[in-house]
Every structure is written in structure tokens, then in C-alpha cells.
């Protein structure tokens, strides 16, 4: 978000100053900026697509990790007291960059 702001795109202050220890929530204001980026800023849109590639790879890794844990410990409790496989499965479809996914059909 700071990169987009540095490149002259109007990112809301609340997004730039959010608590980064929390998972990013989708933002319609950011999505409007991203749609404009994809339509009018080819270099920055290429960078955004690289972030989507990273996000896709992370989701694929999560899936493989779930299957490895399932194979190794089955339904036993996970490390740190988590529910193990159940917890890991709940993370499978949580993107790191939700706004980039939300705009897929807009450009």
C-alpha cells in the first residue's frame, strides 16, 4: 500500500496506518485504486500480478502442508495447542492480498 501511495495512487490514510499485526481486511477504496492501476499503470500492475503469484504459491504450500500434517499426525492436536489439521484447513482460502483477488473480474 505504501508503494502504491509512493507511486502517486490515492491510498486511504486509514489503510496506510492500520495495525499491521492484524490480517488485512478487504477495502473497497483500495480495490478502486487497484482497478485504476490495472487499467492505467502497466508497470505497477505487473508488480501486483507478481504479488498474486506469491499469494497463489503460498496457498498451494498451505494445501501441501495440510496434507503432510494429515498424513503425519492425522486428527491429533497440533503444535501450540491448535486443533491441528482442522486449524490448517481453515487457513487454506485466506489470501494475503484480498483486494487483489477481489478485483479479478473488474479489468
Image (cartoon, rainbow, N blue to C red):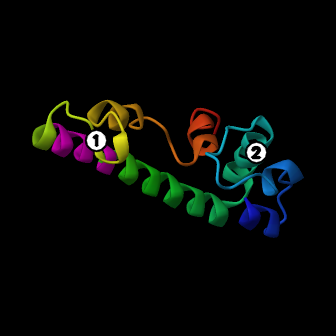
Q: Position of residue 61 (x, y in %)?
A: 30, 51
Relative side of 18 to 70, left or right: right
Circle count: 2
Magenta stretch, main secondary structure class = helix
49 left or right, relative to 17:
left
Of tags 1 and 2, the one toward the viewer is 1
On the image, the x and y values in percent for residue 11 come to 83, 53
Mark 2 surroundings within 10 Å by alpha-carbon count, few (fewer than 14), some (14 through 19), many (20 or more) = many
Relative to the observer, which residue lies in front, 83 or 37? 83
Instruction: Give the residue at mark 1.
Output: 78
Q: Quadrant of residue 101?
A: top right
Judge left or right: residue 24 versus residue 74: right
Instruction: Tell me the residue at 57%/48% (across/down).
Output: 97
Q: Secondary structure at mark 1?
A: loop
Q: Nearer the viewer, residue 20 or 3?
A: 20
Q: Quadrant of residue 86?
A: top left
Looking at the figure, which quarter contains the N terminus?
bottom right
Q: Is residue 65 found inside the magenta-colored segment of the image?
A: yes
Residue tagged by mark 2?
A: 30
> Where is 106 relative to 18, above or below?
above
Residues 89 and 73: in front is 73
Q: Residue at x 66, y 63 (%)?
A: 44
Q: Is residue 32 above or below residue 86?
A: below
Q: Please give the range of residues in magenta.
A: 61-70
- Residue 106 vs 17, above or below: the answer is above
Marks 1 and 2 sit apart, C-alpha to C-alpha, by: 36 Å
Q: Quadrant of the C terminus?
A: top right
- Callout 1: 10 Å neighbours few (<14), some, many (20+)? some
Q: Is residue 3 above or below residue 14?
A: below
Q: Position of residue 95 (x, y in %)?
A: 50, 42
**Residue 83 is covered by the magenta coloring:** no
Amino acid at each position: 500500500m505504501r508503494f502504491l501511495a509512493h507511486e502517486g495512487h490515492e491510498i486511504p490514510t486509514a489503510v496506510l496506518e492500520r495495525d499491521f499485526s492484524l490480517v488485512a481486511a478487504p477495502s473497497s477504496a483500495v480495490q478502486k485504486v487497484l482497478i485504476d492501476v490495472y487499467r492505467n499503470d502497466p508497470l505497477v500492475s505487473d508488480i501486483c500480478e507478481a504479488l498474486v503469484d506469491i499469494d497463489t504459491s503460498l496457498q498451494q504450500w498451505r494445501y501441501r502442508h495440510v496434507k503432510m500434517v494429515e498424513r503425519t499426525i492425522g486428527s491429533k492436536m497440533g503444535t501450540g495447542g491448535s486443533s491441528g489439521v482442522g486449524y490448517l484447513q481453515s487457513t487454506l482460502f485466506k489470501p494475503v492480498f484480498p483486494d487483489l483477488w477481489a478485483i479479478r473480474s473488474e479489468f
